[in-house]
Amino acid sequence: MNNSRFPISLHILTLLDDASGTVVSSEYLAGSININPVLVRKEIMNLRKHGFVDSKEGKGGGSFLAKSAEDINLGEVYKAVKNSNILGQSKNEPNPKCPVGRQINQHLNTLYDDAEKALIENLSRQTLADFALKFK
Amino acid sequence: MNNSRFPISLHILTLLDDASGTVVSSEYLAGSININPVLVRKEIMNLRKHGFVDSKEGKGGGSFLAKSAEDINLGEVYKAVKNSNILGQSKNEPNPKCPVGRQINQHLNTLYDDAEKALIENLSRQTLADFALKFK
DNA sequence: TCATTCTGTAATTATTTTTATTACAGTACA
DNA sequence: TGTACTGTAATAAAAATAATTACAGAATGA
């Protein structure tokens, strides 16, 4: 997983909540996060796909929350952002000739899934509203 | 975090448990994991530093478990291996001029710490012995 | 005792992943 | 109809990971 996606997405959502309905440009968001606007727009596309935000094209356009911050929990945000397993498996191609190597991925996966479930459950206890409240 | 360190370390530990006291070379471990022996030796240095394994230099040398597999729980292994926060913060330098950017890292950290605690607690329910049993 | 086979470790290079940049079509506003 | 945005692709740059090479030092055993 590209593990900077979660903080970026949460940062975006927090700023959008802060803007309370106002439309915010990717330029502005990128400025606060201190990353490239194109990367922000990509993350927004993903958040949009998951129904967290919506955006308006054209002059004066930008993004805004698509639902109330009370209705967005951080576990959902995590799930929307993760694309591989959290405990790592990038380029993991163990030797199939080894009895351990042959089966380890399958066992790692069940281990990961279970542990990640605990993580998500914990994150889900907090909504975006709870998180954003800390900035006020 | 370099998130392939956890699977590598767990793979090493599983193979060492499998070898039941026999000394295993980094060459052999690397062959099963399908990575470079030098990387294995680096991981072993870390596992050694944390008291999980020990190794013997010289001809016929190699590594072996330093304690019983029942006494190694996977949460401890995770902690020994992780070096940054799991939910990601690589090159996260938000704009200090922005009220949200200025404080977000602090809030992300408490969020991460809490969520990671849940993850580790889950992993800690399983020992290396439990995990290795699956290969028998 | 000395060739052999390992570990430990540093230095360098290669590869992969992530991020930034550039570019531009399309949309909405004023 | 110019201006300020989004959406998106393509490319380049930078950063992170992993592999390779190299070699000193340790233990073994012939």
Image: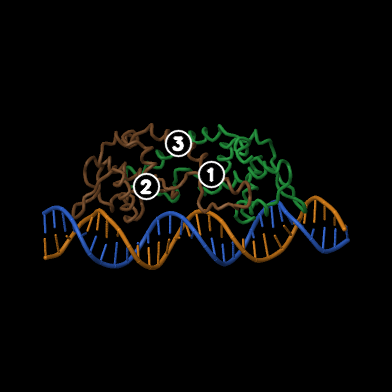
Chain colours: A brown, B green, C blue, D orange
- Label 1 SS: helix
Amino acid marked by disc 1: Gln
- Label 2 SS: helix
- Label 3 SS: helix
Quadrant occupied by the C terminus of chain A: top left
Mark 3 to mark 1 CA distance (whole Å): 17 Å
Which residue is denoted by mark 2 in the rendering?
Answer: A8
The image quadrant that residue A75 belongs to is top left
**Left or right position of B94 against B8:** left
- Tell me if label 2 and label 3 are in contact, CB under 8 Å: no
Label 1 CA crowd tier, 10 Å (few <14, some 14–19, many 20+)? few
Amino acid marked by disc 2: Ile
Amino acid marked by disc 3: Lys
Mark 1 to mark 2 CA distance (whole Å): 31 Å
Return the disc, 2 or 3, that comes first in the chain's sequence: 2
**Residue lying at 51% horizontally and 43% vertically, measured from the top left:** A109
What is the chain letter for disc 1?
A: A
Residue B114: give x, y in percent of width and height: 45, 34
Between C6 and B103, which is closer to the camera in this rendering? C6
**Left or right position of A112 against C27:** right
Mark 2 to mark 3 CA distance (whole Å): 22 Å
Return the disc, 3 or 1, that comes first in the chain's sequence: 1
What is the chain letter for disc 2?
A: A
Which residue is denoted by mark 3 in the rendering?
Answer: A117
- Tag of residue A106: 1
Between D22 and B109, which is closer to the camera in this rendering? D22
Return the disc, 1 or 2, that comes first in the chain's sequence: 2
Label 3 CA crowd tier, 10 Å (few <14, some 14–19, many 20+)? some
Examine the rendered structure and indicate whether residue C16 appears above or below residue A8: below
